[in-house]
């Protein structure tokens, strides 16, 4: 039987996997994609890796960039140093007529969770990934929503605070600035009133991590509790607005921050009652942690043909 291959393309490596009919990864390969190698050389290496995995029936790519929907042009993959690259055309030189499906990497991860992870059994799902930035994907009636006008679904750059703190995108007050792991690190690094946070940061050579916020809350530190309450409020503003507009059946939260478990999810589920329109009448979706971790991107990429129109 021909193989289905998913490729999760990152800034330093591409993770390849053969994905079975049961949506499980049975064979893996990692290929370096570091900056400095040309686009053409990277694609040649990727294609060689893909073809070495056996009789290939279909390939899906999750790419860290927005894409032009009609031509699958990579608009700007900053971490790879790619601008306006025709990925499909370049792949075709090596892969010939093997069907190729291409989507944004956050979209691919959402597709993985939809079929094999926390979104299983639903026909619509919103996913937010709280990591270095805030990414996300939205699936509606079993189809991936890809945005229009050559730009994808970018929930991380929804503005939740007027004249808020600057975002890496150039705007101010984006959800990402407040709710990414980077946002948490910024806030706890500046906090001088939390003995627990100061100790945790000092013990780590002065380097803060998002996990320290939750550790300090577990220790009962009041300043850390206040920071978490403010974090949850901001996240609920973003999630509530998205739910009001999109009305997904389930909301899946991934990324490192989602590892905080009930410390995050219990107050978030409570806080969205105030941010989702008509919650008191019709309620809102369950908000759950992602289930697949880093494998979501490979599995989702391999299944892109199922959700692209
Ligand atoms: Zn932004």
Image (cartoon, grey):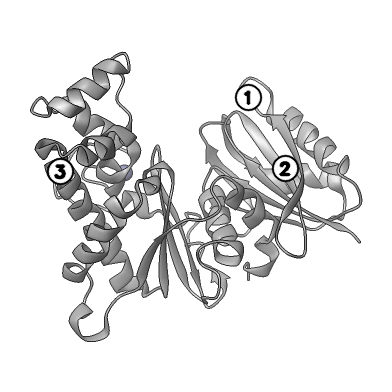
Image location (x, y in percent) of residue 238: 27, 58
Which residue is the site of mark 3? 225
Name the residue located 42 percent from the left edge and 75 percent from the top edge: 249
Q: How far apart are marks 3 and 1 (CA)?
A: 40 Å
Tell me which numbered mark, 1 or 2, is placed earlier along the sequence: 2
Image location (x, y in percent) of residue 118: 50, 63
Q: Tell me the crowding category of disc 3: few under 14, some 14 to 19, or many 20 or more residues within 10 angstroms, Cα based.
A: some
Q: Tell me the crowding category of disc 1: few under 14, some 14 to 19, or many 20 or more residues within 10 angstroms, Cα based.
A: some
Nearest to viewer (mark 3 / mark 1): 3
Instruction: Indicate the quadrant containing the N terminus: top left, top right, bottom left or bottom right.
Output: bottom right
Which residue is the site of mark 2? 16
Q: Residue 289 carries which label?
A: none
Badge 2 marks a residue whose secondary structure is strand
Q: Residue 34 carries which label?
A: 1
Image location (x, y in percent) of residue 14: 67, 36
Rendering quadrant holding ligand 1: top left
Using the rendered view, name the quadrant where residue 117 is placed. bottom right
Instruction: Indicate the quadrant containing the C terminus: top left, top right, bottom left or bottom right.
Output: bottom right
Nearest to viewer (mark 1 / mark 2): 2
Residue 223 in the figure: left or right of residue 140: left
């Amino acid at each position: 039987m021909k193989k289905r291959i998913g490729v999760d393309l990152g800034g330093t490596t591409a993770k390849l996997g053969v994905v079975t009919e049961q949506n499980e990864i049975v064979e893996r390969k990692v290929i370096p994609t570091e900056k400095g190698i040309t686009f053409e050389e990277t694609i040649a290496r990727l294609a060689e890796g893909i073809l070495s995995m056996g009789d290939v029936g279909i390939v899906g790519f999750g790419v860290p960039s927005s894409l032009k929907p009609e031509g699958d042009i990579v608009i700007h993959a900053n971490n790879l140093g790619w601008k306006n690259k025709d990925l499909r055309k370049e792949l075709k030189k090596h892969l010939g007529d093997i069907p190729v499906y291409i989507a944004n990497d956050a979209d691919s991860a959402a597709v993985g969770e939809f079929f094999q992870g926390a979104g299983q059994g639903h026909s619509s799902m919103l996913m937010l990934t709280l990591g270095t930035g805030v990414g996300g994907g939205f699936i509606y009636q079993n189809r991936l929503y890809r945005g229009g006008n050559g730009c994808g679904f970018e929930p991380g750059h929804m503005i939740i605070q007027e004249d808020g703190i600057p975002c890496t995108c150039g705007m101010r007050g984006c959800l990402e600035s407040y709710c990414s792991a980077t946002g948490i690190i910024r806030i706890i690094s500046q906090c001088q009133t939390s003995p627990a946070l100061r100790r945790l940061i000092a013990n780590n050579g002065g380097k803060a991590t998002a996990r320290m916020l939750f550790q300090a809350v577990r220790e009962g530190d009041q300043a850390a509790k206040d920071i978490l309450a403010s974090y949850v409020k901001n996240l609920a503003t973003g999630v509530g607005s998205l739910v009001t507009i999109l009305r997904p059946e389930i909301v899946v939260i991934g990324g490192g921050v989602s590892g905080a478990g009930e410390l995050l999810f219990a107050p978030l589920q409570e806080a969205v009652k105030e941010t989702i329109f008509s919650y008191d009448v019709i309620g809102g979706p369950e908000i759950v942690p992602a289930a697949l971790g880093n494998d979501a991107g490979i599995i989702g990429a391999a299944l892109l043909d199922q959700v692209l129109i």
